[in-house]
Image: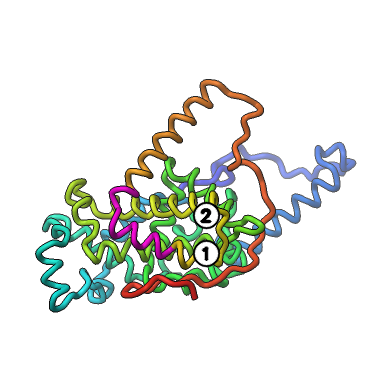
Amino acid sequence: MNAHPADTARPEEPLVPPEPLPTRVRGISAEQRSAQEEWEAVEDIQSVLLGRSAGSVPLISFNEALQFFQTADLSECRKKIQVTVRRQGLAALLHFLFGPPRLQQQLQGERDLALAIAQCGLDDNQAVHMRILQTIYKKLTCSRLGCPRYGTHWEELGFQGADPGTDLRGTGMLGLMQMLYFVMDSQTLPLALEIFKLSQHETQNFPFCIMSVNITRLVLQALREECLSRECNRRQQVIAVLNDLYAAAFLQLYRVWKSQHKTIADSGFLLKELEFSTKKKPKQLLKSLETYVSRSTVSAADSIQQPSPLSVSSSQASEEINFTGICDLQVELEGEVRLI
C-alpha cells in the first residue's frame, strides 16, 4: 500500500501550543472552516459505512478486473453456464446447414469465461467487486469520493433500488464489467457520459444502469446463439467483441432515443429492435461504433488545435437530475424482449 503524504517521516517539531489568532489571520474564514468541518464529517460517515475512506478506494481498470476473474476460482459458476441455445428438430437442422459458423476451439475458453462471469453474483467480500462498483459510480458522477455500498444514490444512477446486486440477474458481474469497460475506456467514456446525461432528461429520462444490464443480456443472447462467432473468429477475440457490441448497441439506442424523442414507454419496442440488430446485424452495429469513435477522435483533435471559448458541447451543459418514472426493464433470454 502506498504511503500517504501524512505517513511520511517529517522533521520533529517542538510541541509548542500556538497563540490564539483571529479567525481571518489563520487564513480561512469561519464560514470556510465550518464548510471544511462538514466535508470532513461526510468523509468520516463514509469511512464508517464503507469500512474505510471512500476516497481511498482506487479506481480499477477493465483489464485489471478481467485479470482477477481469469485467476479466480469460478468452478461453481462454470457449472451453471449454458454455452449455446438448445435447438431441436427442424430448427437444429436448419441451424446446422445455414446457420453461422461455430466458434473456433481456441476461443471457446474465453467464451466460457465470459459466460462464467455472467453467472457470478456481486460479492460484498470481494474487494475487486467493490472497486468495480465504486469506479462506475465515480466515473458516471465525476466524483472524487466513493459512496456507501447501499443507498438511494444507486437509484440516481439508474438501478432499481438501494442494492445494485439485485439488478444483475441474468448478467451477473458481466453486467458491471461491461459498464466498467464503458466508463474506463477513453474512447467510449464521452459516449457513456452523453447517454447518462440523456437518462436524466426531464421528459426522456430512463434508468441508465437497468438499460445497460438489458443490453448486456442482449449481447449474451447473441453470443449463445452463435450470432457473434464469425466476428469473434475474424478478430480472434471474444470478450472484446462483446464489449464493442455492447457499446455499439448502447450508441444505437442513444441515437434513436434522442433524435426521435423517445420516453420510457418506448423502451420495450426499442429493446426488441436492438435484439434483432445484435443477432442479425452485429457487423453493421460494430461498424457504426467504429465510425462514431473515429469521428469523435478527429473532432477532439480539431478542438485542441483550434480552441474556442464559445464551443461548449451539449455534453458539458448541466441539467437538473430527474428520475421520475423509472420502470423495471427486463429482457427474457429465451423469449421476447418486453418492458414489464
Q: Are marks 1 and 2 in contact (CB under 8 Å)?
A: yes
Asked whether the viewer can see residue 84, the reply is yes
For disc 1, the marked residue is: 266
Measured as percent of width and height from the top left, residue 80 is found at 26, 76
Residue at image coords 57%, 54%: 261
Helix, strand, or loop for circle 2?
helix
Give the residue type at disc 1.
Answer: Asp
> Which of the two residues, 144 or 2, is positioned nearer the viewer here?
144
The span shown in magenta is 271-285
Please provide percent x and percent y for residue 220.
31, 64
The residue beneath circle 2 is 257
Q: Label 2 crowding class (10 Å Cα cut-off): few <14, some 14-19, many 20+? A: many
- Indicate whether residue 97 is drawn in magenta: no
Q: Position of residue 182 (x, y in %)?
A: 43, 51
- Structural distance between the alpha carbons of marks 1 and 2: 9 Å
Element assignment for label 1: helix
- Which of the two discs, 1 and 2, labels the residue nearer the N terminus? 2
Q: Residue at x 49, y 76 (%)?
A: 340
